[in-house]
Amino acid sequence: MSLPADPDPAWKRRQRSRGHVALAVVRTSSGATRVSDLAESGPLRLRLPRPEPGPLEAVLLNSAGGIACGDAFEVEAALGPATDVVLTTTAAEKIYRSDGPTTALRVALALDARAALAWLPQETILYDGARLVRRLEADLAADARLTLFEALVFGRAARGETVRSGMLHDHWRVRRGGRLVYADSLRLEGPVADRLARPAIAGGARALATLLHVAPDAEARLEEARALLAASGCEALGVEAGASAWNGLMALRLLAPEIGALRTVAARIVAGFRGRPMPRVWQT
């Protein structure tokens, strides 16, 4: 006699990872930005390299080495008045194949008056069959400055991997002075590679990125961003890009066949736009 089928799929019995980092910073009497509170849980950690002149640099580390199906990670950053922070990651984040559950990533950023934040993580790599819901929410004071950069890669190029199927829901919401100024949602489901091949979506690109700058002078810097784009060598590297500005923000989009070329172009543009080199972890 055969045994009855297990009523629960295997993934329901697995231990799932929950990672959380909450950072708060203040400006000292000397004008430096320092950590006032830091909470960490699960495999997510924050490392603070040796202080140097300029912004406080904080580096996110996932000690698990990647994010599996059903995991949930959350990053919160609260910047006090007149603080200056750069947040980045030690390496590319990997979203592994799922056999059912969805991976959840959430980033919540809050900037007080005259605060400045550069959110510059390295790329997120989606494996074939990955299922990811990612939300980025930012709440800025009217005179705060926020520079966001995010890159997505579909499949591991070194292995010739194609993301034949999967799911990606990527939502950005930015509020300035309590008013919604930027809302962007990307939804890809089912045959992801087929959808990316469509000219109206990605034209066959496997790596894409967005640079968003929200600040009082953001619109006035559009021509500067376009000049940096023209000088970046994007055409020679096969990277398509364009910039536009409206509603107190500037947005630049990039598409490329592979992440190497996109990283090269993006690093040149971001460093030129900020007037500072990329975080050191980007260069290792």
Image: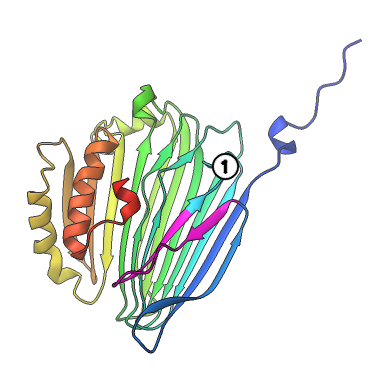
Quadrant occupied by the N terminus: top right
Q: Residue at x 60, y 31 (%)?
A: 99
Residue named by callout 1: 102
Q: Residue furthest bottom?
A: 29
Quadrant occupied by the C terminus: top left
Q: How many marks?
A: 1
Q: Residue furthest front?
A: 50
Identify the image's colour scheme: rainbow, by chain, secondary structure or one colour. rainbow
User: With respect to residue 255, does 19 lie above or below?
Assistant: below
Q: Secondary structure at mark 1?
A: loop
In the picture, residue 51 is in which quadrant? bottom left
Identify which residue, 203 or 12, lies in the foreground: 12
Which residues are drawn in magenta? 43-60
Identify which residue, 237 or 98, lies in the foreground: 237
Place of residue 212 in the rendered image (x, y in percent of width and height, measured from the top left) = 28, 60
Graded by Cα atoms within 10 Å as few (under 14), some (14 to 19) or many (20 or more), the crowding at tag 1 reads some
User: With respect to residue 241, does 138 lie above or below?
Assistant: below
Determine whether, in the image, residue 26 is placed left or right of residue 221: right
User: With respect to residue 79, does 273 lie above or below?
Assistant: above
Q: Residue at x 36, y 48 (%)?
A: 122
Type of amino acid at the residue the image marks with label 1: Thr
Q: Residue at x 18, y 65 (%)?
A: 275
Place of residue 151 in the rendered image (x, y in percent of width and height, measured from the top left) = 33, 47
Residue 10 covered by magenta stretch: no
Place of residue 10 in the rendered image (x, y in percent of width and height, measured from the top left) = 72, 30
Place of residue 218 in the rendered image (x, y in percent of width and height, measured from the top left) = 20, 70
In the picture, residue 258 is in which quadrant? top left
Q: Residue furthest top?
A: 1
Determine whether, in the image, residue 31 is placed left or right of residue 98: left
